[in-house]
Amino acid sequence: MNVRLGFAHRGLSDWPAPRGRFLPASAPLAPALPDSHPRAVLAAAVALPAQPDWHGGHDPAAHALDLPLAAARPVWEASRLGALPLLAQAARCDPAGGHLARAEALLGAWCAANPPFRGVAWACGQEAALRALHLALALALLDADRDPPPAARALLALCGRRIVATSLYALAQDNNHPVSEAAGAFAIALLLREDTSRPASALAARVARLVAPDGGFAQVSAGYARLLLDVLAIAEWLRRRHAAPAFPAPLAERAAALAGWLHRITAPTTGGTPRLGLEDGSAFADLSLAGPADARGSVERAARLFAGRGADSPEDPGCAWLSLPRPEGTLHRPARWRAAGTMGWAEGPAMALLRTGPLRFRPGQADLLHLSLRDGDNWVLRDGGTGRYDPPEPWWWAALAGAAAHNAPVFDQAEPMPRVGRFLLANWPAMRPIPDGATLRDARGNRVTRSVRPEGRRFVVEDKLSGPFRAVAWHWRLCPGAWRVTPDGLVGEAATISVIADAPLRLDLTDGWESPSYGAIVPAPLLRVTASAPIGRVTTTIRLP
């Protein structure tokens, strides 16, 4: 509302761009690191683009709050300035390599191309916060965070001004935005030697609202859970480095619980996480150089900082950069667990994940009762992913975010939650947990009770149906492979699937879609199971080899 009333515009009037020196003239030597990591750092630094695209076609002279944000996400990535910590790492690994000069030039070029509060880089308070956190991290890695050079101080202050201008908008999002912005405000106050009590209290309050005691996050998404943990971890590390007072409760406990949740759903050998809800391919403060596809470094860092335990990466180079000692204990992966929004079952190398309720925060996709199943490193049953927040073709929405894009029943080919915005769905179903699954009742009165029963290398999924529907369909999205239809299901190298019911079924192997990374979409095999009313019970058994 403050944006509509013009308050934010008045708070973001034209301001002088930072000038002078941003970074120190030299860098300390690198800490002890795994043997191959310095080479990886230098290779990644060499691969950075010489001239990033700061604007992506948006008008660089327009006021930031007047710009449409279509296609902004890829442009924002460059303006988060994640290259700064990387170049700081490179400068410490190779002091004579010119990396500090590159970082200095990058900051100067960014400020020249993005005058304060003009252009798409200033359009979002969260982006300003992530930019400030990356700058604070780079300064800390260079041992310059206790007395930042003048231009760095000026840029941090501008980011703080941008955060404050639309803070009420961030609060209304009920997602990672208010957490990132409070963490950014805390880091800015810390490095500018201002009072940190207010942003610290705000950060703790945001975490208390959005992260449940069991580790469930308002955004049911592995990618956004990782981003939240990374932001909290950097804020906590900076707090400790500056000997600032501990964050108010329950921040540490909730962050530890969220780290445990992400650990449970992360493949221990690859760091892969399930596609779940929305995510945008972020890899914030990626000191491990793991990239968006490997969450192990993020889990390891958060586990050490908030839980006093390790995870799956005892030799994580990111933790070495932060001088985080290796704890004796490790996070536990329970065989059965429940968190706000999800349930999980682990059987040896296999893990099943069910999207449940009840719904307290807005869902990002029509994915309720969706089931994903991983065997080892392979997601046999999977979610289609995100695609893009502003897809180039309208059919992307239904193909990736709609009910038929998920492994759960769809009644009468109708969306149970009509889309009323890019990130808003209407008519949320009523949901109730049961001991081995969840029950859903949609706005039309159709009801599903889904239970999951692991039996060693078999996972049995039972759906009980009722309501005024005329037809029902399941769309099981499968991993790539040679699948063959059988009278009661499918056979493939990854699994054998059988489906039985108390009514006739039709089974078809067809093509669906999946998004392997943000902005990409590719075909994916799909088992479609359809039936007409009356039908009351369907049992799907997935046998792993």
Image (cartoon, rainbow, N blue to C red):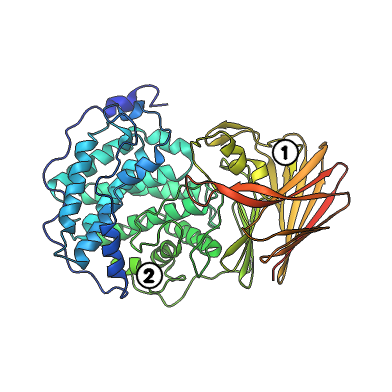
Residue 189: where, in percent of width, then height? Answer: 25, 47
**Crowding near the residue tagged with mark 2, few <14, some 14–19, many ≥20 C-alpha atoms within 10 Å:** many
**Residue type of the residue flagged with mark 2:** Asp
Place residue 479 in its image quadrant. bottom right
Residue occupying image coordinates x 38% and y 46%: 180
Q: Is residue 379 above or below residue 356?
A: below
Q: Upstream in the sequence, badge 2 or badge 1?
A: 2
The residue that disc 2 covers is 316
Residue 179: where, in percent of width, then height? Answer: 41, 46
Q: Quadrant of the C terminus?
A: bottom right
Labelled disc at residue 82: none
Residue occupying image coordinates x 29% and y 48%: 81
Place residue 127 in its image quadrant. top left
Count of numbered badges drawn on the protein = 2
The residue that disc 1 covers is 442
Alpha carbon separation for disc pair 2 and 1:
45 Å
**Residue type of the residue flagged with mark 1:** Asp
